[in-house]
Amino acid sequence: MANKLIKQMGLPNSIANIFTARNIITAKDALSLTEFELMEQLDVGMAEVKSAMAHISEVVCPPCQTALLLMEQRVRDERSAGHLPTRLRGLDEALCGGLPFGVVTELVGPAGIGKTQFCLKLSLLASLPANCGGLDGRVIYIDVESKFSSRRLIQIGIENFPEIFLKKGMAQEMAGRIVILRPTSLSEFTESLHHVQVSLLQKQVKLLIIDSMAALVLGEHDCGASRQQALGWHVSFIKSLAEFSRIPIVVTNQVRSQIGDEPLTFSFQARSHSIKKEDRAAYDSHLVAALGINWAHAVTIRLVLEARSGQRFIKLAKSPISPPLAFPFNITSSGLVLLDDDGIEMKGSEINTIHCQGQKALFNSEW
């Protein structure tokens, strides 16, 4: 705003022309001088100088806002931007309507916990007709680990929306709205993102899913530094896609073990350093998100899926507007189902900790 031209600020032509004649072109030029210096250079009275300076300052300086006004503006922006409802009532209420448009939402958790199951249902919800609560659009699903199952997709559709999927030809039509890309290398993934950018402009794409981001980056870069360098461009590009297209982007992330005296990357991974050697075995199953600090900051919504004492939980670990809540869930023939819509409020670092207790019994189940 400091470089805004004075002649474009709505000053009376008589005074605006004097500024131009004295080579005072921008707001910065004018505001860098005192009132007395301006009076001398412009050869006008103090009243005219004060009036002009007040007008220029008002134009270039943002108005003062209270915390309440900023909060109300954020709520208005969220509502106007739109959401993709997950049909998980408690989670949607906590997120003020579902997964917000224009940002990146991350699903992080151990293998077999239900991330892909969640993505399959989100794909269906985005492709459903608007009169059924969907976004009535296409979905681009980047299936890095070849986990996408069309049979499972149709099953979830029949269980949740029988009035649509049991009609002749409708299951094929819904499935036809979901485009699957399967890059096998980071370079192919980069190329896929460029194709996605073009598709967002030319087609009615309403959701982008990347399952999973970590599989490619971790597979090609063992060193943390080179990994972060490779990830940097993709982080920026995916965020810009979300902001430009105003659609929800969902990315799954893997986990890795955090044991012994290994340095901690994130503040939310902190725990007591006074653990005795004989107790360290108890932390062998402690998990952290696989991707680095740049990625952690890039995502707007982080949902942590974990298993504790034989029960699955989905935790709202990061959100600019939502409380830290954990919802117990099961995976059934219809997909993810919450067992409690109220949620459990989490405190401290526990909301970001990823447990895998009792995972064998859970992950060997039918779903």
Image (cartoon, rainbow, N blue to C red):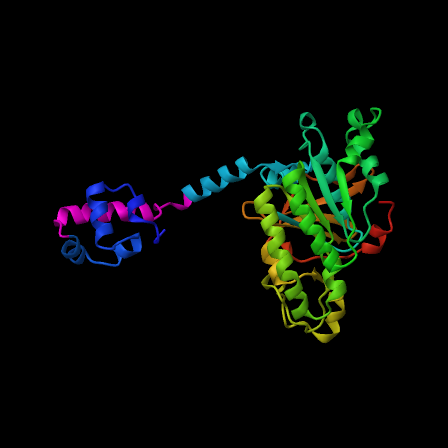
Residue 2: image location, x then y, percent: 34, 53
Which residue is at the far bottom?
A: 277
Magenta range is 43-68
Residue 172: image location, x then y, percent: 82, 32
Q: Is residue 277 above or below residue 156?
A: below
Query: As rendered, which of 287 and 2 lies closer to the eye?
Result: 2
Examine the residues drawn in magenta and state their main secondary structure: helix
Q: Is residue 128 above or below residue 353?
A: above
Q: Quadrant of residue 137?
A: top right
Which residue is at the far front?
A: 21
Residue 238: image location, x then y, percent: 63, 51
Residue 261: image location, x then y, percent: 68, 74
Q: Is residue 158 visible?
A: no
Query: As rendered, which of 346 and 235 lies closer to the eye?
Result: 235
**240 lies left or right of 328:** left
Q: Quadrant of residue 359?
A: bottom right
| Residue 51 shown in magenta | yes
* Residue shown at the point (70%, 27%) measured from the top left: 132
**How many numbered discs sit on the rendered protein?**
0
* Residue shown at the point (17%, 53%) measured from the top left: 42
* Residue shown at the point (77%, 43%) measured from the top left: 330
User: Image quadrant for the C terminus?
Assistant: top right
| Residue 328 shown in magenta | no
Q: Is residue 93 visible?
A: yes
